[in-house]
Image (spheres, rainbow, N blue to C red):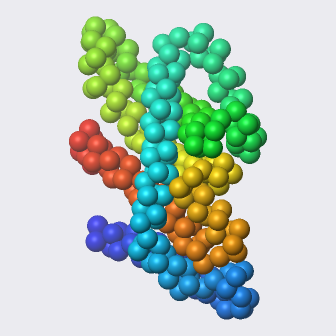
Amino acid sequence: MEKKRLIYNILAPVVGCVVFIALWFIVSAAIGKSIILPSPADALSGFFVLLGEGQFYLAIGRTLGRTLLSFVIAFALGCFFAFLSVKSEFFKKAFSPVAVIVRVLPTISIILLVLIWFRSATAPYVITFIVIFPMLYTTILNAAENVDSKLVEMCQAYHVSKGRQLFCLYIPGMTPAVLTGMSITLSFSVKLTIAAEVLASTQGSMGRYMSQSSAYIDTPTLLAWTLAAILLGFILEGLVLLVKKLLLRRYHGR
């Protein structure tokens, strides 16, 4: 049964990818113009060309650095504000409108405003932070509030220390939901950072090279950079899900 489930989990994504690539090939062949839609082979060829260029790795490193730094700051502050919201109902109600307003602000408005206020090198950090902070705050707060209330009451009744409650109750109880939210938010942060780099024309970034490819109507290279961005998002999301799986085994034995 376990072997059949493993085969099914591998086969389904492979079939989906094959169908997508086949449709891409058919549409590209029907259009017949590489400048509009290159074939999968052209895009892959462009990707391998990029792999041989030093600027490719430098650009990925810079974009990844911006993404991770913005994410870590947003996550740390999300944990802090979620903690305050759990401890104080007044703070939660006071901060709630702020979180909602920031969350529903159009992303393009945030980008355009930040581009006015900050330099092109700084703007991607700020934009990514502003957009993902309320998402992480909400994820962490919901995870904390969904910890078994009966266990919390029992810990309080038996005067269990705050540190023991944190490491033995809250962290194990919150881990699945928080890491699932982190995996989604982190891959989204990659897209957001690149979009900000495109609009800010951030020097030496993936977004800058994508913008240049578009300006020169070099569609194969643009798709090659897009493929690199997709792989980067997949890798980051996969790493978080792997950590989630390992922690679930440790905390819950599964």
Left/right placement of residue 145 relative to residue 200 reads left
Name the foreground residue: 5 vs 22: 22
Left/right placement of residue 106 relative to residue 125 reads right
Name the foreground residue: 134 vs 211: 211
Q: Residue 217's spot in the image, x, y percent?
A: 70, 75
Q: Is residue 150 visible?
A: yes
Q: Is residue 59 above or below residue 128?
A: below
Q: Residue at x 28, y 71 (%)?
A: 3
Q: Residue 99's spot in the image, x, y percent?
A: 64, 27
Total numbered labels placed on residues in the image: 0
Name the foreground residue: 198 vs 99: 198
Please tell me in which quadrant of the rendered image residue 9 appears: bottom left
Q: Residue at x 26, y 38 (%)?
A: 251
Q: Residue 79's spot in the image, x, y percent?
A: 46, 26
Q: Residue at x 64, y 69 (%)?
A: 213
Can you say which quadrant of the picture contains the N terminus? bottom left
Q: Residue 247's spot in the image, x, y percent?
A: 29, 43
Q: Residue at x 33, y 52 (%)?
A: 242
Please tell me in which quadrant of the rendered image residue 114 appears: top right
Q: Is residue 142 visible?
A: no
Left/right placement of residue 20 relative to residue 47 reads right
Q: Is residue 147 above or below residue 162?
A: below
